[in-house]
Image (spheres, rainbow, N blue to C red):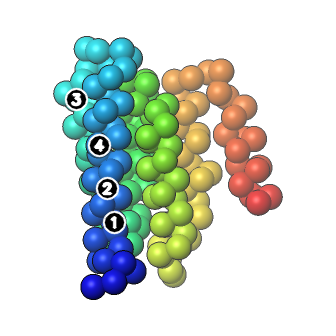
Amino acid sequence: MDARRLTERHGDLLLAGLLAVLFTVQIAGEQHFAGQRPATLAVALVFSGTLAWRRRLPLVPLVAGAALIEVSNLAVPELANTGTFLLGFLLASYSAGRYTSGRANSSCSATPHIEPMMLVKTETSLAASPLILRTTLTVA
């Protein structure tokens, strides 16, 4: 089996596993998560696991990312601010654009406009940020 076929067959599982390991190391090593490690790790691992479906069901990681942002807003503010989440969400966003078609593609194009607005709910200093991000993404 050549490398390309191996990557096509098992690449998403490897990617999800790598992200899970990165989340585990980050959550275990940072003081921000001191009192909430088990719950935070559970949410992070669920999000990581959804990346295994990024080609077959590309909207699943986006929905999981939105759920992680909401959990972060309500309980663990530091979780959605990690570099690991950014990496995972960028992969989920790319996959949603790359592997969807039809009506699902319309749903994916709305996501960059909706998810930054979730940040406004708890962080008032970011009130202008969704407008700037939305304008940037629309122009791009």
| Residue neighbourhood size for the residue with mark 4, other residues' Cα within 10 Å, grouped as few (<14), some (14–19), many (≥20) | some
Choose mark 3 or mark 1, whichever is in front: 1
Which residue is disc 3 drawn over?
39
Considering the numbered disc 4 on the image, is that residue within a helix, a strand or a loop? helix
Q: Residue at x 54, y 46 (%)?
A: 115
Quadrant where the C terminus lies? bottom right
Which residue is disc 2 drawn over?
16
- Among numbered discs 4 and 2, the one appearing first in the sequence: 2
- Among numbered discs 3 and 1, the one appearing first in the sequence: 1
Considering the numbered disc 3 on the image, is that residue within a helix, a strand or a loop? helix
Which residue is disc 4 drawn over?
21
- Looking at the rendered structure, which numbered label has been put on residue 92? none
- Among numbered discs 2 and 3, the one appearing first in the sequence: 2
Mark 4 vs mark 2, CA separation in Å: 9 Å
Q: Amino acid at mark 1?
A: Asp
Within the image, what quadrant is residue 20 found in?
top left
Residue 117 % position (x, y)? 58, 40
Please state if 114 lies on the left or on the right of 24 as rendered. right
Residue contact between numbered discs 4 and 1, judged by CB atoms under 8 Å: no
- Relative vertical location of residue 42 with respect to residue 39 in this rendering, above or below: below
Residue contact between numbered discs 1 and 2, judged by CB atoms under 8 Å: yes
Q: Amino acid at mark 3?
A: Ala
- Among numbered discs 4 and 3, the one appearing first in the sequence: 4
| Residue neighbourhood size for the residue with mark 2, other residues' Cα within 10 Å, grouped as few (<14), some (14–19), many (≥20) | many
Residue 72 % position (x, y)? 40, 30
Which residue is disc 1 drawn over?
12
